[in-house]
Image (tube, rainbow, N blue to C red):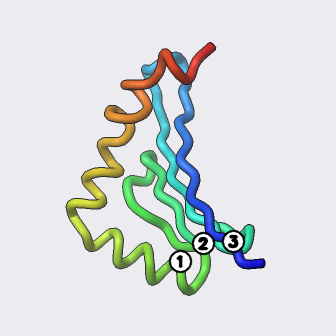
């Protein structure tokens, strides 16, 4: 069975003072590409993931969209995510 999955995570440190957004892609339970807001660009972990990361990093609209996700997704929904 082949499985493909994408997962987005918000990590809050000291409230909304330090926020980290991660967007990860998996194929067959193996992570092949990830965006980390602390790094600021996509990173590939497999040959296909490296190719995909290069493609996405060369798309300025996509990289700007995920870079702003710290504010538009994480900080905006902080009260929803926290108990």
| First in residue order: circle 1 vs circle 2 | 2
Pointer 1: what residue? 49
Discs 3/1, front: 3
User: Residue 58, located in which quarter of the rendered image?
Assistant: bottom left
| First in residue order: circle 3 vs circle 1 | 3
Pointer 3: what residue? 3
On the image, the x and y values in percent for residue 16 come to: 44, 20
User: Residue 60, located in which quarter of the rendered image?
Assistant: bottom left
How crowded pointer 3 is (Cα within 10 Å; few <14, some 14-19, many 20+) is rated as: few
CB-based contact (under 8 Å), mark 3 and mark 1:
no
On residue 32, the disc is 2
Left or right of 9, for residue 37 = left
> What is the CA distance from the residue labelled 1 to the residue labelled 2?
5 Å
On the image, the x and y values in percent for residue 11 come to: 56, 33
Label 1 residue SS:
helix
Label 2 residue SS:
strand
Left or right of 1, for residue 8 = left
């Amino acid at each position: 069975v082949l499985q493909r999955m994408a997962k987005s995570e918000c990590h809050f440190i000291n409230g909304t003072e330090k926020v980290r957004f991660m967007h990860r892609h998996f194929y067959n339970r193996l992570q092949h590409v990830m965006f980390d807001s602390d790094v600021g660009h996509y990173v590939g972990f497999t040959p296909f993931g490296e190719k995909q990361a290069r493609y996405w990093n060369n798309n300025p609209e996509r990289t700007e969209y995920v870079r702003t996700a710290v504010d538009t997704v994480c900080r905006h929904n902080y009260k929803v995510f926290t108990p």
